[in-house]
Amino acid sequence: MRPEDLNDLSLLGQKSVPYIFEYQPEVLEAFPNRHPENDYFVKFNAPEFTSLCPITNQPDFATIYISYIPDEKLVESKSLKLYLFSFRNHGDFHENCINVIGKDLVKLMEPRYLEVWGKFTPRGGISIDPYYNYGKPGTKYEQMAEHRLFNHDLYPETIDNR
């Protein structure tokens, strides 16, 4: 990593970073992709995501899966952790949380491709697994996003961990 790549990162390496309990997209930080000539996936699994039901104020728990093909920028992982943590006291429906996360990451990085999948634990006997994806308009990634959206859940996994 080149020192100039770290200029815009304020959270990485800090020992006392406050954890904000309300939705805070401005905590997200990005750094330059040193390999923009390559197509490659970056994947994050966040098994401790928590938000609140906007009606009952009950906690909702999920594993959030984020996968993307970067273009010029990558999301810094500590800022992503703090960002996801900021949903802890945020009241919103599962579907909206996933769409907001996806749109915030697209705004931050302008990736070639991005998908966010939330696997929420059941409440009332029903689990909700919203899926968001994005492909850069006018590129092959836009077509990839459409294909993955139409085919993302053809072979649902066995639900034995919830």
Image: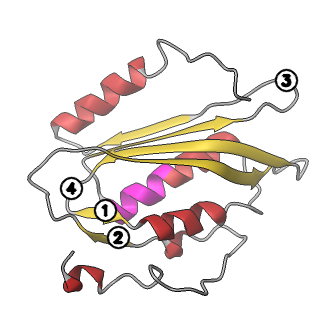
| Circle on res. 71 | 4
Using the image, determine if residue 113 lies above or below residue 75. above
- Give the x, y percent position of residue 25: 54, 69
Q: Earlier in the sequence, mark 2 or mark 4?
A: 2
60 left or right of 151 in image: right
Contact between labelled residues 3 and 1, with CB atoms less than 8 Å apart:
no
Amino acid of disc 3:
Gly
Residue drawn at (54%, 46%) of the image = 99
Contact between labelled residues 1 and 2, with CB atoms less than 8 Å apart:
yes
Q: Which residue is identified by label 2? A: 30
Amino acid of disc 1:
Leu
Q: Earlier in the sequence, mark 2 or mark 3?
A: 2
Q: Where the N terminus falls, by quadrant?
A: bottom left
42 left or right of 129 in image: left
- Give the x, y percent position of residue 100: 55, 53
Label 3: which secondary element? loop
Q: Which residue is identified by label 3? A: 125
Using the image, determine if residue 136 lies above or below residue 104. above
Amino acid of disc 4:
Asp
Q: Which residue is identified by label 1? A: 74
Q: CA distance from mark 2 to mark 4?
A: 12 Å
Amino acid of disc 2:
Ala
